[in-house]
Each structure stands twice: as structure tokens, then as C-alpha cells.
Amino acid sequence: MTDENTNRSAGVVYDKKNPFPSTLKRRVLLNKEGSAKETLHLELCLASSGLEYLPGDSLAIVPTNSPEVVGQIIEVGGFDASETVELKSGSTKPLGEVFATDLNITGVTKNVLKKYNAFAQSEKIETLLNPENKAALDDYLRRRGVIDMIADFPVPGLAASGFCGTLRKLLPRLYSIASSPKAHPGEVHLTVAVVRYHSHGRDREGVCSTYIADRVNEGGTMPVFLHHDKNFKLPEEGATPIIMVGPGTGIAPFRAFVEERAAIGATGKSWLFFGDQHRATDYLYGDEWDRYLAEGRLSRIDLAFSRDQAEKVYVQHLMLEHSAELYSWLSDGAVFYVCGDVSRMAKDVHEALISIAEKEGGKSREDAEVWVKQLQTEKRYLRDVY
Ligand SMILES: Cc1cc2nc3c(=O)[nH]c(=O)nc-3n(C[C@H](O)[C@H](O)[C@H](O)COP(=O)(O)OP(=O)(O)OC[C@H]3O[C@@H](n4cnc5c(N)ncnc54)[C@H](O)[C@@H]3O)c2cc1C
């Protein structure tokens, strides 16, 4: 990823320092009734912003915290929401507003706990911070938040300014762009998985995904800026074949890629691997893929719906099932793209590529690894993983 772009329109520059207030034109739930997932399709307006993107870029959204969570922190911490607090920049604001817009009031890290303990002086925190107790610390931090920290280790009379100093800044979140500007001039589309879960007796929410889902209405605005990725791009030649692996929200940039190649009349073959839980409820943009296939704008799709059969099937299993064809596409110069979950999927897909090179290319494990590395060096194996 490169630095944020700077865009000018009528003398106004919209970038990280001055995000564009983009109107939410449309928000659609992509999953059907009965799904365990909540994946949203968003259409945002960029008209008159001067912001220009290409498929493969991301959009950053600057969220605000949930008023419920702000209220809980104020109540449990015994704070006064109207108290004026001075920010690092020197400006002053009421504490309630600082919690809503400036600070990360949800996630706890080792460093946050350490800073907080300057006030709490808790022996239990001290013990958790001892390097010998890393497992216990990880266990405490996992699925807990700021609210648990202040409830578990109360500090009567804690000064608001001191407490604010223990917290991290609230940061923008990135989303892979799911549209081609050629297909949707003046708009940018996103595919967002909403984070909601329950742990340690509390309902929890991802800050930005629930800001998008719950706190901005259609017709309302959200602050955005572009984040360009100079590597995760379509090949310059429209005739070059592409292979796209994008389960879950990893599908987003590939919707942009397929739209773009359709708009420019690219002749190269395209092969999409998608996966999620169930075909009936989670085939994201399924109608569009079926139409592109029928029109010949997408050459091939392989679908891994993990929970539609007794044995879990994931995208890497389908890659291995079709290893001969996949190896042949790569040998013919195809560019291979992966987008989505970095923690498991991207590793499994990487491993599958090595296995395919061993099996179909008759290579030793070592040579297969070199071959995959070479694909990366040639920028024919590109990843947008998070
Ligand atoms: C380059 C890039 C592209 C991205 N593209 C997309 C995209 O296209 N679509 C998309 O949806 N996201 C995308 N993301 C991820 C996105 O930026 C956010 O991280 C995501 O939406 C969560 O943000 P949040 O503020 O809602 O959650 P946060 O408030 O940041 O909370 C997320 C945290 O909650 C915890 N958590 C989440 N679920 C659970 C659970 N079930 N149990 C316990 N803990 C849990 C985890 O610690 C997780 O890190 C992308 C990220 C990057 C870096």
C-alpha cells in the first residue's frame, strides 16, 4: 500500500487530513434470511470530490464510536461527559465528544493496560504484565475491552484527562473497493462484514462496521479518503488471463476487476474462486456472477460453500481439485490474486499454490517454493489480505 492520495476539486483537497463527506446512496444486506453472516453492500457518492480510484484501491472510512459504548464508559468510569478535556493538539472538547470521535474506547492492548495501571496500581495487572505471564495476559486481552478494564480495576475519582492519556487514537478503517469507476461513475462501492459478537457477558461490536451498518442512514454522510495500492492492480494487457481467489468479503476487489474488464472489453480469460458458508444465503453478488458467466465476461467460477456438506470445503480445496488447469493457466502467464482473511485463508491458498507446483510441475518442495516466489517477484501473485 502506498500513501494516501491527495485530490483537489475546486481548490479543496480531500485526503486523510481532510476526509470527504461522502453521501451513502444505498446500503443492501447481501446475505439472505437465515444466514449467520451480516455482509453489506454500500454505494457511496464521490461526485464533485475530485477523488479518483482504480480497481484494487481501498477506501478509508473515519468512524465514530457507538453512543451506547460511550455511555457505558462514562457511567462505569464515573466520568462527567460535559467536562472539558484538552487534546494533544491543544484544542479542547467535552469528554463525551472525545470518547465519541477521538479515542479508541473499545480495544485493550498490553500498552493500554500498562498505562492504565499507573492509576489503578493493581497487583493483578502488575502480575499480568510480567513477561512470564504472557499466556494469562493474552487470555485477559482476548475478547475483552476498555469497558472490562475499568470495571475490573476501578479507580475512584480517576481524572478524565489522565484516563484519556491511556487510550489509543480512534483510527480510520480500510475497505477494498468493490466497483469500477467506469461502471459506476461518481460512485464507490464496498462490501463490509459487520462485526458483532458476545464475550464475557457483554455484546460487542466492531467500531467501523457497525458505524456503517447502524449509525449512518441512507442519505447521510460519512468521512472518507482514498488509499491507493499500486501493486494490487489488473494487468495492463486486457488479454492477460487472471485468477481471483476471494472468499467472504475478499470478493470485493474482484467485483471491481470483473466490472472493469467488462467495461473496457478485455479479452483475457478470468477465473474466480469464491467461498462462504451456504450457497442459499451467502453467495455474495451471485446474480452478477451468474450473469457475467452467461455473457462470457467471466470464464469460470468455482464455489466453496463450507457448510453445505458434512466435510468443510474451502477455496484452497477447489484450487487443489483443479490443479492441472490452474497450473496451466499460470504457465500461460495468468496473474493470480488473493483477497480476504490473512490469518488462515491466505496461508492455505499459498500452501495450495506450492502443492500445485509440486504435483503439476513435477517440482521438489524447494523448487515449488522458488517457483511461487518467482510469481511474486514477477508481480503475478498479488495479495490484498487483512
Ligand atoms: C487493506 C484492507 C482492506 C480491507 N477490506 C475489507 C473489506 O473489503 N471488507 C471488510 O469487511 N473489511 C475489510 N477490511 C477490514 C476492515 O478494515 C476492518 O478491520 C473491519 O471492518 C473491522 O473493523 P471494525 O471497526 O468494525 O472492528 P474493530 O472495532 O476494529 O474490531 C475488530 C476486532 O474485533 C475482534 N473480533 C472480531 N470478531 C470477533 C469475534 N467473533 N470474537 C472475538 N473477537 C472478535 C478482533 O480482535 C478484531 O480485530 C480491510 C482491511 C484492510 C487492511
Image (spheres, helix red, strand yellow):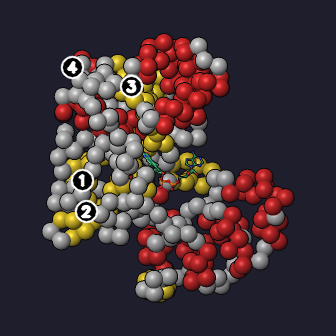
Q: Nearest the camera: 376 or 133?
A: 376
Q: CA distance from mark 4 to mark 3?
A: 21 Å
Query: Label 3 is placed on what type of residue?
Result: Ala
Q: CA distance from mark 3 to mark 2?
A: 33 Å
Task: Give the mark nearer the N terminus: 3 vs 2.
Answer: 2
Task: Give the mark nearer the N terminus: 1 vs 2.
Answer: 2
Q: Is mark 1 within 8 Å of ligand 1?
A: no
Query: Label 4 is placed on what type of residue?
Result: Glu
Determine whether the residue tagged by mark 2 lies in a helix, strand or loop: strand
Q: Residue at x 54, y 29 (%)?
A: 372
Q: Which mark is residue 60?
A: none
Q: CA distance from mark 2 to mark 4?
A: 36 Å
Query: Label 2 is placed on what type of residue?
Result: Asn
Query: Is residue 215 something that shows in the picture?
Result: no
Q: CA distance from mark 4 to mark 1?
A: 28 Å
Judging by the rendered image, the residue that carries numbered circle 4 is 295
Check contact, mark 4 vs mark 1: CB within 8 A: no
Q: Give the quarter of the image for residue 354.
A: top right
Judging by the rendered image, the residue that carries numbered circle 1 is 52
Q: Where is residue 142 shown, x and y percent of the image?
A: 67, 53
Task: Give the mark nearer the N terminus: 1 vs 3.
Answer: 1
Q: CA distance from mark 1 to mark 2?
A: 8 Å
Q: Nearer the viewer, mark 1 or mark 3?
A: 3
Relative placement, left or right, of 150 versus 129 is left
Badge 1 density bin: few <14, some 14–19, many ≥20, Cα 10 Å = some
Q: Residue at x 69, y 64 (%)?
A: 110
